[in-house]
Amino acid sequence: MGIRIGKQMLDENQQIQFTRLWTDAQPTVSQFVASLVRDPWAVRDIVQNVSLVLLRKFAEYDESKPFLPWALGIAKFEILGHRRDAARDRLICDSLFLDQYTQAWADIAPRINHEMEALRLCVGQLDGRPRAIIKLRYADGETSETIADKLNITADNVRTILKRTRDVLRRCVERHVGLQGESA
Amino acid sequence: MSQPDDQFTNDETRFDHLMEQWLESSIDADQQAELLSRLKEHPEEMRRFVEANVRDQMLRDAARGLILMDQVNEVTSSLHQPQRRSLKRIITVVASLAACLLVVLFLFQKSERREAAIETFVSVASLYQTDSPLQNGDRLGSRTIEIQRGFIHLQFDDGVEVTLQGPARYELIGPGKTRLHTGLLTATVPPGAEGFQVSTPTADVVDLGTAFGIEIDAEGVPEVSVFDGEVEVIPTNQQDKRLLQEGEAVRVNQRHEIETSPFDAVTFEKVWPIASGVAGSTGAFQFAPHWPRPMGLVQSDTDIFVLPEGYAQFLNKPLGVNITAPGKVRVAAELSPSDIPAGTRVKSFLLQFKPLDLRDDRATRPNQPNPDELARIVGEITFDRPVLGLIVVGDDLRASDGIFSKRGGQFPQKGRALELSGTPRDDTVTLSEDRRTVKLDLAAHGAFGDQVRVIVDQSFEN
C-alpha cells in the first residue's frame, strides 16, 4: 500500500527511503533555517513546509546525488517565500548571497556535524559563570548587553567570557574527536 | 553606511566583529550591508561566516540540551527531598520529564556509546546503598557524578582513591583534577600521585601525598581535614594559601578566608571503611580509622579492630602468607602457605583483638580459665576485593610488619599469632569461597591478643 502525494504515488520502499534520508538531513536543515530566521515558530513552519515539499517531489529525486544539498535548496526557497525576519532581510533577500550561503552550508555542515556529540559532552562539563552565560546566550538567545545586565558585569566581560568559553569548548571537542579518531 | 570604529583597524578583527553582531542578532542595517558586501566578494570570508553559523547553531542545540538536563536534575533532586508533595503533582512532573528524557536519551544515545572511546581515567571500585546508576567496574572519563544517598568508591588510574558519601555532586574534570560541588568525600593519594586536586566553591585543595577529607556544608563552605601527610589549601581568589598537616582542619568561608577548625574525624567515620576497601562487617569487628591512631592502646575484651595499613602498594619481593585456600583452619596443619609474587599490587589490613591490659588488677582475670566458660569473640569482615592471603603465624607477622605497618612494628608484640591447636581454647579462621570474607572465632582469655594480617588484591584489572 503506497501513499499518494499529489499525483505521484510513493511505494513502500520509497517511503522508507524518504524517512531515512529526511531523518538524517532534518537537523542540518533545521539549523540552516534557524541561522537565517530567528523566529522559532517561523523556523518550525518553514522546516515543516520543506519536509512536505521534499515528500511531494521525492519521486523526482535522483538517488545518485546527495540528499542534503537538494533539501537545503528547497529550504532556501521556503525561506525566501517566508521573509518575515526584518532584521535579516537585507541578507536573505539577496539571491546571490543566499545561493553562496546555501552551497557553503551543504559543504561545511556535514564536515562539522560529527562534532555535535563531543560538543554536548563538553558543554555539559562547563561550570559556574561560563555555564550560565552559555545558557543565556545560546539557549535563551540573550545578547551580551542583556546578559551583562542580568549578571551585573560589563558587556565586554560577557564577550570575553564567551570567547574564552568557546575556545575551551573548541579544545575540548578537538580532544574528544581526536580520541575517537585514534580509537576508531 | 557607518564607518568602522577606530578600534577595528585590523580588517580581520572588523570582520569578526560584524560576524559576532550578526550571530547575536544585534547587527544594524549599515553593518548588515557592509557584511553582505564582504561576503559576496570574498569566498574565504563566506566560508568562515558559514562555519561560524553552523557552530553557533550546534552550540544552541547543545545549550538547550544543557537546560533540559539541569531541569531534570533539579526536579530529580527535589523529588528526593523529604517534603510532602501531592501524588498527582509528582506524576505530572514525572510524566512530562519522561517525554523530555526520551528526547535527551535520544540525543545522548550516540554520545554515551562513544564515551567508552573517550579518555577514561577512573574505575568504579564499589557502590553501597546508593541510587547511582553506575556499576562496579565502570570506566569513567570527564563527567559529573551525582548521588542522593549511599557511597561510591572510585579508583583513579594513578592509584588515587576517592570515596563519595551522598548526597553529593562530584565532577571528574580530568586525570588528577576534580571538583566537589556538594557533599562529602575522602581521598587517599599514594606516593607518585601527588598534586591530585579537588576544587570546591571557595578553595582548591591540592594533595602533597596524603589522605584527607572534605565536607561542603549547606552554604557551600568546604571544611578540609587532613588524616595523614600534607595538603595545600588555596582559596579561589588566590589571595592566601595554607599548608595543612596531619590532624589539622580548616574551613574556607565565602569571603575566601581560611579559618582553623577543630579536627573531627567523626564526620568521616561512615565513609572510612568503604574508602579503605571494607565492604561490610558483622559481629565483633570495629573499624579503627587509619588517621592518627595509637594502635598499641586499641584494646577491648569484646571487639576485634580493623586497621587499614596505609596505601595500596606493589610488592618489591615475594610475600610469605599462611592461608591462601578457602575453608576453615583450626589447626596449623590446615594452613595453606604460599608466596604472593613480587610485583603484585596489594593492600594490607590488620585485624587485632587485644584484651584490656589488667596487669594492675590481675585478680580479676583467672590464670587458668575453665574451657567450658570461655567467652568467644566472633566476627566476619568482607572486603571489596579478593583476599590473596592471610598471615597468622608470629614469625610471618613480624616479617611483614616492616612492609605494611607504619606504627605497629615499632614496638614488640608478644603472643600475637593465632592459637591453632584445635582445642576449645584455640582460635579458628575461615576464608570464604569467594575469598572476600574472613571469619574469626577467637578464644577470649589470657593477657595476649591475636592478630591476623589480611593481604587484599589491589591489581588494577579487578
Image: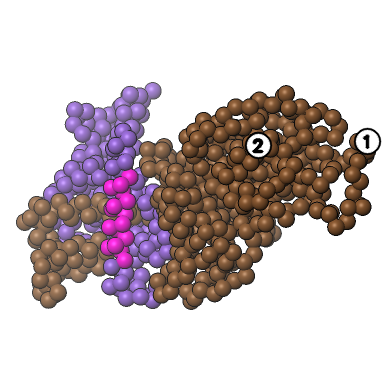
Which residue in the protein does label 1 denote? B372
B453 vs B162, left or right, is right
Q: Are marks 2 and 1 on the same chain?
A: yes
Which label was assigned to residue B29? none
In the image shown, does B257 or B394 lie closer to the viewer? Answer: B394
- The amino acid on which the numbered mark 1 sits, given as a three-letter code, is Asp
Query: Residue visible at 35% across and 24% down?
Result: A12
Label tally: 2
Query: Residue visible at 76% across and 48% down?
Result: B354
Looking at the picture, how far across and down is residue B104, in whole percent?
Answer: 45, 46
Which residue in the protein does label 2 denote? B395
| Up-down relation of residue B97 to residue B264 (above or below) | above
In the image shown, does B113 or B51 lie closer to the viewer? Answer: B113
In the image shown, does B298 or A26 lie closer to the viewer? Answer: B298
Disc nearer the start of the sequence (2/1): 1
B301 vs B155, left or right, is right
Which stretch did the figure color magenta? A161-176
In which quarter of the view is residue B20 placed? bottom left
Q: Is residue B293 among the parts visible in the rendering?
A: yes
- The chain assigned the colour purple in the figure is A
Question: Closer to the observer: label 2 or label 1?
Answer: 2
